[in-house]
Amino acid sequence: MKFSSHNESETVAIARKLAVALKPGDVVALYGELGAGKSVFCRAILRALGVTDEALPSPTFAIIQEYQGENCQVAHMDWYRLGDADEIEMLGVRDFFQPPWIALIEWPERAAFMLQDHVIRVRISPDLKDPDLRNIEVERA
């Protein structure tokens, strides 16, 4: 599915549509440049899943943030600062790829081999003609 977003509110609405279809065991891998909107997308999914924590910081430094949603647990991961796949593997992230968890992963290309075949890929990219426009592609393998 392909979407276009002109602003943060539209990006949030697209993320909420995806969140409605998520179930424990799902893994969402978010691809995009720095500042593309991956964290905005993740925060919108977290809110839509019933996470009520006041602050939802990007897990860039914590690497993994765990949350309790309405009917699930959610792990929001940011693999940007990790050096290699071995480092990611040592964190035990595969535990988050099965129920009761829903996993949201920013910068999944750091260890793409770890992702299951049924991962949901979200690609966020700026439009070549309009830098304020974001193209968002959601693909369920």
Image (tube, grey):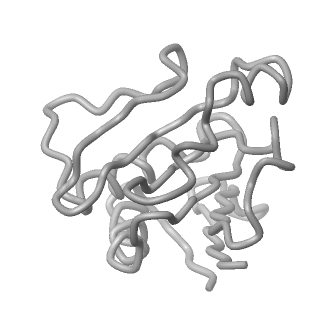
**Residue lying at 70% horizontally and 57% vertically, measured from the top left:** 125
Left or right: 97 in relation to 107: left
The answer to whether residue 3 is above or below residue 80 is: below
Total tally of numbered discs in the picture: 0
Q: Nearer the viewer, residue 85 or 37?
A: 85
Residue at 14 percent of width and 32 percent of height:
54
Work out which quarter of the rendered image holds the N terminus and state it: bottom right
Which residue is at 29% across, 39% downward? 67
- Figure quadrant of the C terminus: bottom right
User: Can you give x and y, in whole percent of width and height, for residue 23 in the image?
Assistant: 39, 71
Is 140 left, or right, of 132 in this rendering? right
Image location (x, y in percent) of residue 66: 36, 34
- Determine whether 123 is above or below 23 in the image: above
Identified at 46% across, 40% down, the residue is 76
Which residue is most to the bottom? 1
Whole-percent x and y of residue 56?
29, 33
Image x and y of residue 50, in percent? 18, 56
Q: Nearer the viewer, residue 100 or 14?
A: 100
Image-quadrant location for residue 28: bottom right
